[in-house]
Structures are given as structure tokens and as C-alpha cells.
């Protein structure tokens, strides 16, 4: 890793030039950390910001102008292997975004002298600066089946008000604010070069002048976050009646079967199935190519917003106020049914999946058409 001779000074008067950020482990969460990284670089413009991240996410940070270097690790690597990598990097200050004990222990064993993170059980011992929990956080507590049944049986239920001040973006901003950084959110941004877009088009043989709509029907967390496959197909058919578009199916290796089923039930020469065929950077370039993206609440949703593509998202078991895309939070295109049991934060719906079933394919299609007709 390249070293520089530049240095910065924190608000507490401590010189720092090599700053490490221990990144999070999920794609969507990684995008939500970008505003904090932006604010950190604004405060210390001459610092070398290195991110320690899982290998599956390492290329994401190459698209951020605020990140200088990336150290990647495979989940199968042991704690001491990762710590040894940190020792070789001569780091001075570490900011730990995950709340896990292991993430703090990595930096402790890696010899990072100053380690900042949220105070949590079993890990505070490994921190030199313990940041108290962000006071406006709302726990994403999973509802029990009994609680869900009680909610839906009460006709006078009152939906919990969740302010955007509880959004996950603030969780990461408060850590860098400890160093005197601006705690006001910045939009998560990923820089996709024209070269990457050109190479994506060339690789997959896409027409230069076609209008593209992306479809991302998967969600790694679980089926409760997935709008039903048949509704995706219905919405695509409605859109096809109104405008001429080329459809791009996005997904990871776990979404290949779903995408193949959609392709089989939506036979069209104007559809390209890219599931399991793109790298992370290619996925970002593909989302950038699109005029609009229909997606579940998942990592590619955050990517599409971060590259500037309009999105339409059916939300069911989760809360857009807590983990919605972009900043200011995207509101147009976010669809959520008025049901008392949502958000439940469960992976699998224990009843009738009413939160997603109530979002009609026609409504989704109309949202897509509004975006396409305004372009």
C-alpha cells in the first residue's frame, strides 16, 4: 500500500495521516456509510483513508473519491490473518463502523493505536474511544407472530411514526462527528466513469440508443423483502404497452432461477438476463445505463440511487425511514402498503404477506411510466 507524507490534525489536536475505516459487511449498508466517509475526507482532506472491507465489497470503494486504499479480506480468513494485514499497513487511527466484537478486536490485534467505535458489550475493552449510542436510533426489532396477529386484529391501530432522523446513515455519521466532522448527511455517491458504461454496453451487446429499465427481483435477506415474481412480470407487461424499452434483469448467483423464470414468462427479444454475470463495478455501470430501475429493498437499490438512476421500490417488511435509499431520502417511487404489521423486519412473513400483496403491479407500472415519460 502506497504511503504519503501528508498529515492532518483532528479536532482534539492529534496528528493523523493514515486513517482506517473498518467497513460493514453488507452491500446496502456499505453504500449508507459513504456520507460518513465523505464528511471524514472533507474534514481531513490530506489524509490517506483506507477501508478494510470484505472482498465482495472491496471494488465498491474504488468508486468513491474519498477513499485512497482498500484492504480486503475473505470471510474464511481468520482473525489473526486480518490483524496481521493491518499491522503491515502502519495505520494511526481506526473508525469501526460495525458493532460486532470481532471488528473491534481486529483493529486491537492489528496494532491500530487509536480505535473509535460505538460502545457495546464485549467490545468496549478493545476501543480507545467509546462513542455512546446515537440517541435517535430506532431498533429494527423483529415482531413475533403473536404481536403481528394482535396488530392486524385491531381496527384502531396507530402506525408507529419513524422520523428520517433515525435513518441508518446517521449511525455512521455520529462516529466521524466524534472527530469534529460535519454530521449533516451528504448524498451517497458512486462515480461511474463513461469508460465503465461503454465497456458494459460492449460486453453485453446493448444497443446504443435504446431505453433501458432495470429489474432486480431478488433480496438476499429473505423472501419477506421480495415483491412477488408474478407482480414483476405484470408490471413489465403494463409498461411495455406504454413505451418501448429494453429490460435488463439484475441479480446475483442466488437470483438466477428467479430471473430465468421471469424471462420464460416474459418472452421478449428486448430483455437481457444479467443475473450472475456482472461484477460489482459492472452492476453499477449497468444500473447507470438504465433510465429507471424496479427493485426490492436490497443492495442494488442503494447502488442505483447512488449512481443517480431513478428507482421504484415496493417496501414490505422493512422501513424506508430507516434504510431507504439516497439522501435526502428518496420518496417518489417508494411504495408501501398501509398495513398495521409493517415493518416487521422478519425474513419470512408468518401470515399472508399482505404488505407486498397490497402493492399492485399497475401502481408500480404507473410509477415507472411517469419516470420514463418525463425523460
Image: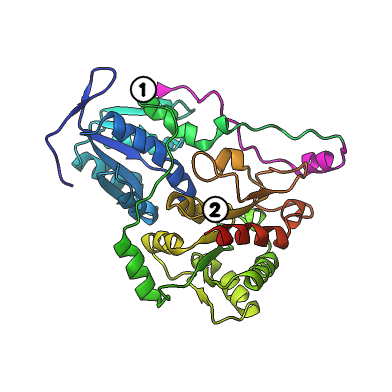
The picture places residue 210, in percent across and down from the top left corner, at 47, 72
- Residue nearer the viewer, 189 or 238: 238
Other residues around mark 2 within 10 Å, as few (<14) / some (14–19) / many (≥20)? many
Identify the residue at horizontal 58%, vertical 38% (top origin).
Answer: 322
Identify the residue at horizontal 56%, vertical 61% (top origin).
Answer: 372
Other residues around mark 1 within 10 Å, as few (<14) / some (14–19) / many (≥20)? some
Which residue, as the protein is rendered here, is positioned at the far top? Answer: 12
The residue beneath circle 1 is: 129
Residue 97 in view here:
yes
Identify the residue at horizontal 33%, vertical 47% (top origin).
Answer: 64
**Residue 79 placement, left or right of 372:** left
The residue beneath circle 2 is: 298
**Residue 362 placement, left or right of 371:** right
- Scheme of colours in the image: rainbow
375 drawn magenta:
no
Q: Are marks 2 and 1 in contact (CB under 8 Å)?
A: no
**Residue 370 placement, left or right of 25:** right
Identify the residue at horizontal 20%, vertical 32% (top origin).
Answer: 17
Which residue, as the protein is rendered here, is positioned at the far front? Answer: 374
Question: In which quadrant of the rendered view does residue 125 lie?
Answer: top left
Which residue, as the protein is rendered here, is positioned at the far left? Answer: 5
The picture places residue 76, in percent across and down from the top left corner, at 38, 54
Q: Which region of the structure is painted magenta?
A: 130-155
Secondary structure type for disc 1: strand
The picture places residue 8, in percent across and down from the top left corner, at 20, 27
**N-term-proximal mark, 2 vs 1:** 1
**Residue 65 placement, left or right of 361:** left
Magenta region's main secondary structure? loop
Q: Is residue 280 above or below residue 144?
A: below
143 drawn magenta:
yes
Amino acid at each position: 500500500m502506497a504511503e504519503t507524507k501528508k498529515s492532518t490534525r483532528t479536532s482534539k489536536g492529534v496528528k493523523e495521516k493514515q486513517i482506517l475505516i473498518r467497513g460493514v459487511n453488507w452491500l446496502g449498508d456499505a453504500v449508507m456509510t459513504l456520507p460518513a466517509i465523505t464528511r471524514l475526507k472533507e474534514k481531513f482532506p490530506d489524509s490517506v483513508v483506507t477501508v478494510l472491507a470484505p472482498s465482495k465489497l472491496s471494488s465498491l470503494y474504488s468508486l468513491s473519491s474519498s477513499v485512497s486504499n482498500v484492504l480486503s479480506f475473505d470471510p474464511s480468513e481468520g482473525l489473526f490473518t486480518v490483524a496481521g494485514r493491518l499491522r503491515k499497513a502502519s495505520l494511526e487511527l481506526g473508525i469501526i463502523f460495525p458493532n460486532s466484537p470481532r471488528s473491534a478486536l481486529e483493529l486491537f490485534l492489528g496494532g491500530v493505536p487509536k480505535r473509535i467505535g460505538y460502545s457495546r458489550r464485549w467490545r468496549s475493552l478493545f476501543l480507545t474511544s467509546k462513542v455512546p449510542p446515537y440517541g435517535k436510533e430506532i431498533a429494527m426489532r423483529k415482531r413475533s407472530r403473536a404481536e403481528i396477529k394482535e396488530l392486524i386484529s385491531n381496527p384502531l391501530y396507530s402506525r408507529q411514526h419513524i422520523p428520517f432522523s433515525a435513518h441508518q446513515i446517521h449511525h455512521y455519521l455520529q462516529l466521524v462527528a466524534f472527530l469534529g466532522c460535519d454530521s449533516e448527511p451528504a448524498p451517497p455517491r458512486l462515480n461511474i466513469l463513461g469508460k465503465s458504461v461503454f465497456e458494459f454496453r460492449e460486453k453485453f451487446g446493448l444497443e446504443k440508443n435504446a431505453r433501458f429499465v432495470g429489474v432486480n427481483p431478488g433480496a438476499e435477506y429473505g423472501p419477506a423483502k421480495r415483491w412477488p415474481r408474478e407482480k414483476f412480470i405484470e408490471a413489465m407487461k403494463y409498461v411495455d404497452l406504454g413505451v418501448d424499452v429494453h429490460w435488463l434483469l439484475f441479480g446475483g448467483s442466488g437470483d438466477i432461477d428467479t430471473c430465468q423464470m421471469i424471462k420464460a414468462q416474459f418472452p421478449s427479444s428486448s430483455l437481457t438476463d444479467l443475473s450472475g454475470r456482472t461484477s460489482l463495478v459492472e452492476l453499477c455501470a449497468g444500473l447507470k445505463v438504465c433510465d429507471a430501475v424496479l427493485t426490492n429493498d436490497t443492495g442494488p437499490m442503494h447502488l442505483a440511487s447512488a449512481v443517480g438512476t431513478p428507482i421504484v421500490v415496493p417496501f414490505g417488511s422493512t422501513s424506508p425511514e430507516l434504510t431507504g435509499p439516497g439522501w435526502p431520502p428518496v420518496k417518489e417511487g417508494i411504495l408501501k402498503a398501509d398495513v398495521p404489521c409493517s415493518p416487521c423486519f422478519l425474513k419470512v412473513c408468518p401470515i399472508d404477506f399482505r404488505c407486498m400483496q397490497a402493492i399492485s403491479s399497475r401502481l408500480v407500472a404507473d410509477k415507472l411510466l411517469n419516470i420514463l415519460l418525463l425523460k
